[in-house]
Amino acid sequence: MIATRARWAAEIEARARAYWTVERTAQLLGDKQPAIRPAEGAVLLRALGLLRDDASLPPAQARKYFQINHMVALLGPALRVLRERHRTIRLLDVGCGRSYLTLLLAWCARNVWNHPIEVWGLDRDPDVVAEASRRAELSGLADAVRFEVGEAAALAADREVHGVVALHACDTATCDALAFGIRVQADVLAVAPCCQAELARGWEALAADNVEGALAPVWRAPHLRRETAADITDAMRVELVRAAGYDVRAMEFVPAAHTRKNTLILAIRGGTADVRVGSAYEQLRDATGGVDIRLARTLGRAGIR
């Protein structure tokens, strides 16, 4: 098996060196400086299904290639913090899916930063975990990255975790990932929320009860309720994480033309928790209807309503 994988990797590397000439590489990258170039990271990119067997990079896969490289660039300051604070970075990927990003991070730690890393990916779907494990094995990163079926709170509570990543964890799963990271005092939290429906459900209940408020016209309109609640949910999350002692930024990480789910919340632990900062969450909650989100309840910041 090892010999077969080694032959496969050698063949992919040879094809990539032949295919990715200086001209082709320049045509693909232009003035971009990605963390991983096609010829240098051909084995990983092939294992991720981005490169074809002939080492070419089709347009659809090229978009994913640039997306994960862009994400690594956005995480750059946070990743430097982790390298400065820890001899071996221990990273948890919650709802890891097929784990494009964390496999790339493991590759960069080994081949770019020369810094030890241990990545642990968790997902509820056994088929997804099996595929991510297969990719880690093919890419030669199985010694640094491993995947399991389960929930962070149940499986990772007794482990040292320095960074928590959750990309497109649906609805309250993003709150759970943030709460777990805060509880274990992870230095870095990076989440890309998806399907923020909890607050919209609360607003729908207000509309059904004919509750009056400044946002009542939004509560009563399903589309406006859904879209507005997504942004307000993320603003609430930012304030709650900030109150827990983190420096927090919310930013666009992919153009809206690709997906509306394009917000990255990036937090770096910078000091002690400040309960006074939490009043910003409470003011926002009260101004928009008084509905708490799961993160507030988990952290003990929820109000009476």
Image (tube, grey):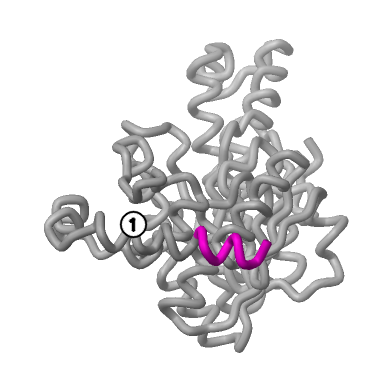
Q: Secondary structure at mark 1?
A: helix
Judging depth in this view, the residue of 65 and 294 nearest the camera is: 65
Residue 225 location, x and y as percent? 54, 21
Question: From this viewpoint, is residue 276 visible?
Answer: no
- Judged left or right of residue 236, residue 129 is right
Disc 1 designates what residue? 15
- Judged left or right of residue 27, residue 72 is right
Q: Amino acid at mark 1?
A: Arg
Judging depth in this view, the residue of 26 and 162 nearest the camera is: 26
Residue 124 location, x and y as percent? 77, 42
The picture quadrant where one finds residue 131 is top right
Task: Locate the C terminus and report the quarter of the image it occupies.
Answer: top right
Residue 142 location, x and y as percent? 66, 66
The picture quadrant where one finds residue 93 is bottom right
- Judged left or right of residue 38, residue 25 is left
Q: Main secondary structure of the magenta part?
A: helix
Q: Is residue 3 magenta?
A: yes
- At a point 60% along the width and 76% down the height, the residue shown is 117
Q: How many numbered discs? A: 1
Judging depth in this view, the residue of 87 and 206 nearest the camera is: 87
Residue 86 location, x and y as percent? 61, 86
* Up/down of 258 relative to 137, above or below: above
Magenta span: 1-8
Task: Locate the N terminus and report the quarter of the image it occupies.
Answer: bottom right
Q: Residues within 10 Å of mark 1 (few under 14, many from 20)?
A: some
- At a point 20% along the width and 51% down the height, the residue shown is 28
- At a point 64% along the width and 29% down the height, the residue shown is 197
- At a point 72% along the width and 18% down the height, the residue shown is 205
Judging depth in this view, the residue of 298 and 291 nearest the camera is: 298
Q: Is residue 152 magenta?
A: no
